[in-house]
Image: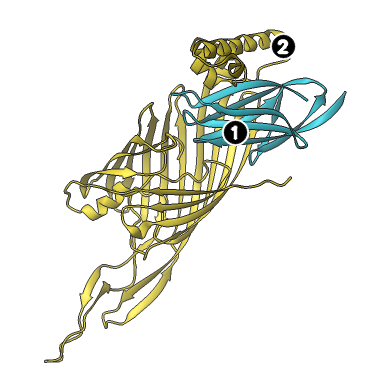
């Protein structure tokens, strides 16, 4: 099976104090809100994210293979009264 | 890989609009008016910030740069480290605007400030999404989110595009929030952070000698701080303990000096600080509780200055929302052991649990 490198970019607003992402069972270390992982292709994968910060703080994640966006999470939000949030999304590479 | 770094221009200001009578209103007004806008590591963006506090001498322009690393320590523990370097300069004519409660340290001097923060989250769960049972649990929750959104009037095709995350589960399927959290978080978890700052500055002082001659001298204030903070589980609250040392200077007392009278000729007097700047060091320890609720937020800060041998309290209560729905203004109560209490109204940048 071939592999593809996916480049992730994380942006935030509203007071996100920290965020972490993983694909499948592997963490994707982020340096200055950017990180990469090599994935098998063609295959369906799960993006998982966690973040902490103010209630209502929002996190956006974009994963690209070259210039093509393969997964996008728009404004995942920390619930009211909480300081942590998480989510998951399927995507194909 | 090149990255476009956005430049954000932030204006924030604090202002005392009214004040009750107090023995030394000017000093306390400075305390009440200090805005809680010190958020150098809030994001990975470069930021230019303008701040203005009660009197115009404490306005500053600030440019900062932040770097961060998010990485796992093990499967349950992750850390987020950030560094920032900020340069700031006063926009006014000096003055002694730095107060007991000031966070930025030297608002009346050109400064370079480095800051390091390490955030530790323990209790993360990395779900095994190769396990069909785990995937089914996840998909069932996500389907409940879609159904709940449709029930609340969201069109079905739009509901299917919603994130499947803590926010949407809390909004559209709150009865599944516990199940969703169980996928991504351990039952026992903790969040805490620690960090510190180092600041060095430069400030010019002009003063009069007894012979009425004018002199200029420059000083290099410096300081450092350290803190440790904890987020109690399931609460939007931050408890912080910290200490700060500032080696700084202030103008000597202002006086009006007149030359010796030579008889009938008129006198030409001068008013200003008389003598070289004097030490105004600060050694502060503090405890702070920051709490965010649905419609308001509050910070309760108790501190003690060993140099001045006095206690102080600072309690801003945020209740006014800005255009971005952030809590950006309200009522502030400040108290100094030697100077009494004062109440004021303030407007500033949005409240954050993590200053």
Q: Position of residue B16 (x, y in %)?
A: 27, 48
- Per the model, the C-alpha gap separating discs 1 and 2 is 27 Å
Q: Position of residue B255 (x, y in %)?
A: 22, 72
Chain letter behind tag 1: B
Locate the N terminus of chain A and report the quarter of the image it occupies: top right
Residue hosting label 2 = B131
**Can residue B72 be spotted in the picture?**
no
Q: From the viewer's perspective, is A80 left or right of A45?
A: left
Q: Which quadrant holds residue B282?
A: bottom left
Label ID, residue B79: 1
**How many numbered marks appear?**
2
Q: From the viewer's perspective, is B226 left or right of A41?
A: left
Secondary structure state at the residue bearing disc 1: strand
Q: Position of residue B38 (x, y in %)?
A: 44, 46
Residue closest to the eye, B25 or B60: B60
- The chain letter of the cyan chain reads A
N-terminal label among 1 and 2: 1
């Amino acid at each position: 099976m071939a592999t593809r490198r996916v480049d992730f970019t994380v942006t935030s607003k509203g007071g996100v104090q920290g965020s972490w992402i993983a694909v499948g069972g592997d963490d994707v270390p982020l340096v200055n809100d950017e990180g990469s992982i090599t994935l098998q292709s063609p295959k369906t994968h799960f993006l998982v994210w966690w973040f902490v910060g103010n209630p209502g703080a929002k996190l956006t994640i974009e994963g690209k293979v070259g210039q093509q966006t393969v997964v996008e999470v728009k404004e995942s939000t920390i619930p009211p009264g909480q300081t942590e949030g998480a989510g998951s999304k399927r995507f194909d590479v | 890989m090149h990255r476009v770094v956005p430049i954000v221009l932030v204006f924030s200001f604090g202002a005392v609009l009214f004040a009750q009578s107090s023995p030394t209103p000017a000093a306390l007004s400075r305390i009440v008016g200090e805005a809680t806008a010190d958020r150098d590591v809030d994001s990975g963006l470069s930021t230019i910030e303008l701040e203005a506090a009660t009197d115009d001498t404490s306005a500053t322009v600030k440019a900062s740069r932040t770097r961060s690393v998010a990485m796992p320590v093990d499967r349950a523990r992750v850390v987020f480290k950030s560094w920032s370097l900020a340069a700031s300069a006063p926009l006014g004519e000096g003055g002694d605007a730095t107060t007991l409660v000031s966070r930025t340290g030297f608002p009346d001097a050109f400064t370079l400030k480095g800051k390091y923060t390490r955030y530790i989250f323990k209790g993360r769960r990395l779900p095994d999404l190769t396990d069909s049972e785990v995937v089914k649990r996840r998909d069932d929750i996500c389907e409940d989110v879609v159904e709940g959104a449709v029930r609340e009037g969201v069109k079905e095709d739009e509901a299917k595009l919603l994130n499947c995350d803590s926010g949407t589960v809390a909004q559209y399927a709150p009865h599944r929030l516990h199940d969703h959290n169980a996928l991504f978080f351990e039952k026992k978890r903790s969040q805490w952070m620690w960090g510190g700052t180092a600041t060095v500055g430069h400030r010019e002082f002009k003063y009069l000698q007894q012979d009425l001659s004018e002199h200029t001298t420059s000083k290099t204030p410096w300081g450092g701080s350290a803190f440790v903070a904890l987020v109690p589980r399931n609460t939007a609250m931050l408890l912080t303990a910290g200490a700060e040392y500032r080696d700084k200077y202030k103008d000597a007392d202002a006086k009006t000096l007149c030359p010796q009278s030579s008889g009938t000729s008129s006198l030409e007097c001068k008013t200003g600080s008389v003598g070289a700047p004097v030490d105004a060091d600060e050694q502060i320890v503090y405890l702070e509780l920051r709490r965010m609720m649905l419609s308001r937020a509050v910070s309760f800060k108790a501190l003690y200055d060993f140099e001045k041998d006095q206690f102080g309290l600072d309690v801003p209560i945020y209740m006014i929302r800005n255009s971005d729905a952030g809590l950006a203004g309200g009522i502030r109560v400040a108290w100094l052991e030697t100077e009494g209490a004062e109440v004021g109204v303030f407007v500033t940048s949005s409240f954050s649990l993590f200053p």
